[in-house]
Image (cartoon, grey):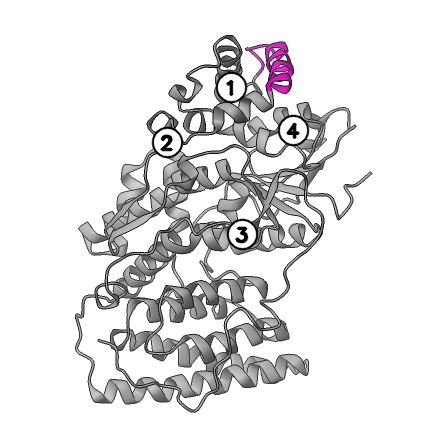
Amino acid sequence: MAAKPADPIFLDTSIQIARKVHRPEIQHSITNRLRQHQEIVSGTVVRQEFKRRLLKEAVYLLKQLDERKSYEKVHRHVLDTLGPLQYRKMKICLDLLVTVYEEDEDEDRFDRTRLMLRDLIKNGIGTAEAHLTSINESSGCACAHQPILEKKPFVRYEFGTDRCSKVKDKCGIRAFLDGHRDLLVRLHDYLASVPDKDASKTDELKSAQAFIRRYLDAPDGVEGEDPCLKVGDLLVALESVGCSTIYTMNIRETQHLAHFLNQSMVYRPPNSDRPEIECLTGMSDWNEKLSGG
Amino acid sequence: MSSSTSDLTEFSAVSSGSGRIASDAITGARPAGYAHAAGTSDPLERSPEPRDAIGQRPQTKRATASDRHALAEHLGDALSFGKDLETAAAACDQQGAAIAGLDLRNSLRALWKLRHVRSDDWATIVNKLQVVTSKVEFEQFTRDMAMAVRMSIESHLRPDVDNDDIRAVTLLLERAGMSPWKCLAPASEEA
């Protein structure tokens, strides 16, 4: 049975980023999906990941533009310098390098790109969250509340810290985890039951499992492990508790976490020719569905 | 350097965010423990620097009186074509929408060429309007989309625009179903 339109849908970081920088067909697809839901929810750890993964790359590109004074040179730099080892960075950078008109000259592209990047840094979070009906702030993520400061337009921005360990006094992650302790015990057992050699058990899931174990054994000082930086997927999953559906472009970790949390998962493939895949609660084999079987 | 005179003194101001499009907030019950999105604080701290130091592009080209005059003319044209597009879209007049849309696109292109006359914030808004009106079929424009474009031109292309205008235009366009961040896809798609 399909999820009821009124069910809350939780947007993870991949969707929040795609709503800003992915291809128009994907954005339309996301918009159409969200129109089916009265409640659109996200969380503060998602905001922190949005800052860290997307907005920091925008600053990186602004610096490149400032240094090279040419759109084409920066474009080439991204293609030549950011190889497979930095694939995610390269992909986001390429997504951010906008071209409006083919007939634009380099100066136009340069100006358009720097204006868009600055706008994204200044207004990206505000406009991304303006479309939500609610934000789960229960994680108490202090990093997410660090303001972005524009020190020098187009050149220098300060994002505050990414490390919970540096804002220990304000970080609420420990209390957040304490509030989900029973759930974490069960999640640890679930992750432990997935063999390490199982290809779907990613390094991130292994890290989450190890983190939960350390937290359960010694909860004090958990902020010292910089959880929102190192086990963001786990924290985002906990933020989504209470929502019946999670919406993602990242199936690798989400398929396990959503399945465990008894949530439906809607997967938006990055290829716009492919339709979204709905993995519903109660469906026995999500793998078959995700592999197109 | 911004001129202190308005380019559109004859046009009535439309309050940002109070239009029909901007007022479609979704309501409903929330899961326990969730704050309302509208109540969240702005994560970008307002810069304490004065306006003349922020939002201004280093001037590489000096704005002449002729540039300012041309800008005012193109802006008037853009608004006029925006209204035509809205009227045509409301009447489902596809041919009229296509003609008005192409004219609007040309006016916006002319405004972009004159961006050195105005601030970076102003140029950002023109760029957004170009993004949402490029690579589109104006025949498919809905009335809400056309209205959002018209309202953006009418209310947010003043000489003294600031970041609040940029944000208002972004939300106006997004809520009408457009993406003002980009219009061309990356070179290749992932499998």
Q: Which residue is mark 4?
A: A258
Give the magenta range: A181-198
Q: Which residue is mark 3?
A: B39
Residue A183 location in percent, x, y?
Answer: 64, 20
Q: Are marks 1 and 4 on the same chain?
A: yes
Instruction: Pick whichever of labels 2 and 1 is earlier in the sequence.
Output: 2
Prevailing SS of the magenta stretch: helix
User: Is A119 on the left or on the right of A60, as rendered?
Assistant: right
Dot 4 crowding, Cα within 10 Å, few <14, some 14–19, many 20+ = many
Three-letter amino acid code at disc 4?
Ala
Report the residue that reaches farthest toward the front: A169
Judge depth for marks 4 and 3 and give the one in front. Answer: 3
User: Is B113 on the left or on the right of A54, as rendered?
Assistant: left
Q: Are marks 2 and 1 on the same chain?
A: yes
Q: Which residue is mark 1?
A: A208
Pinpoint the chain carrying mark 1: A
Question: Which image quadrant is residue A106 in?
Answer: bottom left
Q: As rendered, which of B35 and A103 lies closer to the eye?
A: B35
